[in-house]
Amino acid sequence: MTILITGGAGYIGSHCCVTFLQAGHDVVVVDNLINSRAQSLKRVEDITGCKLFFEEADIRDQDALERILAKYDCTAVIHFAGLKAVGESVSQPLDYYDCNVVGTHRLLKAMEATGVHQLIFSSSATVYGDPQYLPLTENHPTGPVNPYGRTKLMVEEMLTDVAASDPKWRFGILRYFNPVGAHASGAIGENPLGVPNNLMPFITQVADGRRDKLSVFGDDYDTRDGTGVRDYIHVVDLVEGHLKAYEALQARSGNDNCFTVNLGTGTGYSVLEMVRAFERASNKTVPLVIAPRREGDVAECYADTKKAEETLDWRAQRDLTAMCHDTWNWVCKNPRGYDD
Ligand code: NAD
Ligand code: UFG
C-alpha cells in the first residue's frame, strides 16, 4: 500500500511527501532531479521521522516505472513531475510536450500494465487563459495561451478520455493557483535555479540582497492599484488538498471517476500588496521599479473555491502573513537553497 509521488523531490512534491508520510502512508518518489535535489527528500525524512523510498528515474521510462510500481506494490500515483517555466515552454515547446504529455502517457501505460488505476494530477489555473469572469469556476472555458498551459490541458483531456473508457480508473485533476510559502520548519521550500520567473522567489532574492530590485510588470492594469492580482496559496494548504483529493478518490465508484477542482484561496492580492506583506513579515525593504507589462500576463486571476469545499471538504487555512513568514524563514535558514 504505497503511494508513488512523481516529482516528489521538487517544491510542491517534497511538501506533499511530508503530508502523506505524516498521514501514515508509505511513499516512493520518482524524480530525475532535473529541477531539484535529492537533499530535499533527506529533509522530508528529518521533518517526519519516517523513511521514504527514492528511485532516480524519468517518467518517460515506462519500463522503469513498471518495475517501480510493482516493486513497491503501489496503489495510487500523485503526479507532479513535469516542466513548468512558461517562457521556456515558448522557446522549447518540444521538450514540454515530451516531458509533460508523453511523460504522462508513459506513466499511464505503466500504471495500466501493473494494475494501478488511481492518479492525482497537478494541473494549473493557466488552462483558463484570459478570465472571462471572476472568480474562476471549474466550468470556465479553457484557452491556455502558451505551450506549458496547452500541455496541462492536453493531459487533462487524456485523463478524461481514459476515465470515460473504463470505470476502474479514478482521477483527480487539481488546478493550482499560485503556490508560495514553505514548511513551517524552514527545512524545505522553493529552490529556483537561475533567475526566478515567479514573484515570490524574486521578492525574497531582493530582500536577502541577491538582487537589487524587483521589476513590477505593469502598473496600469484595471485592478485596485494597477498591478497584477493573483490567488496566492500556501504550499502546505495546497498539499493538504492533495490528501483530501486522495481520500475523495477512495470514495468514488462507477462512472463518477474523474473530478476537476481548483486549489486556491479565493482571494487575490496585487503585486504591491505582496511586496508590502513580505516587507512586514521579513522586516526588510524590497526596492522596486515599475517595468513594462510582461507578455501573456492577465490583470487578475483568482479561484472560485466552492467546488473544492464540496468535493474535497477542503479549504485553505493559512493567510498571507503565514505565506510570507514561512517563505522568509526557509530563505534565512537556507540562504543558498539546498546547495549549502
Ligand atoms: P518543481 O520543478 O519544483 O518540481 C517538479 C519535479 O519534477 C522536479 O523535482 C523535477 O526534477 C521533476 N521532473 C521534471 N521532469 C521529470 C521527468 N521527466 N521525470 C521525472 N521527474 C521529473 O515544480 P513544482 O513547483 O513543485 O511543480 C510541481 C507540479 O505542479 C508541476 O507539474 C507544475 O507544472 C505544477 N504546477 C506548479 C505551479 C507553481 O507555480 N509552482 C502552478 C501550477 C501547477
Ligand atoms: N510579477 C512581477 N515581477 C516579477 C515576477 C512577477 O511584477 O519579477 C508579477 C506578474 O506580472 C504577475 C504576478 O507578479 O502579475 C505573479 O506572477 P508569477 O510569475 O509569480 O505567477 P503567474 O500568475 O504569472 O503564473 C504562475 C505560474 C504558472 C501557473 C500560474 C497559475 O508561474 O506556471 O501561476 O495561475 F500556471
Image (cartoon, rainbow, N blue to C red):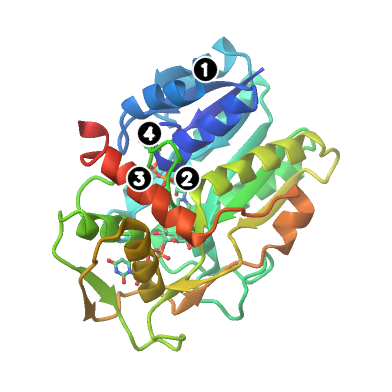
| Three-letter residue code for mark 3 | Asn
* Residue type at the position of mark 4: Ala
Of residue 218 and residue 74, the one placed in the foreground of this image is: 218
Q: Earlier in the sequence, mark 1 or mark 3?
A: 1
Report the residue marked by disc 1: 50
Q: Decide: marks 1, 4 in contact (CB < 8 A)? A: no
* Figure quadrant of residue 336: top left
Which amino acid, by three-letter code, is at mark 1? Cys
Residue 306 in the figure: left or right of residue 112: right
CA separation, marks 1 and 4?
15 Å
Q: Are marks 4 and 3 in contact (CB under 8 Å)?
A: no
| Number of other residues with Cα within 10 Å of mark 3, as a class: few under 14, some 14 to 19, many 20 or more | many
Q: Earlier in the sequence, mark 1 or mark 4?
A: 1
Query: Residue visible at 30% across and 30% down?
Result: 37
Closer to viewer: mark 2 or mark 3: 3
Is the CB of mark 3 within 8 Å of ligand 1?
no
Whole-percent x and y of residue 139?
69, 67
Which element type, helix, strand or loop, lies under badge 3? Answer: helix
Residue 153 rendering spot, x and y as whole percentages: 54, 57
* Circle 1 crowding by C-alpha within 10 Å: few under 14, some 14–19, many from 20: some
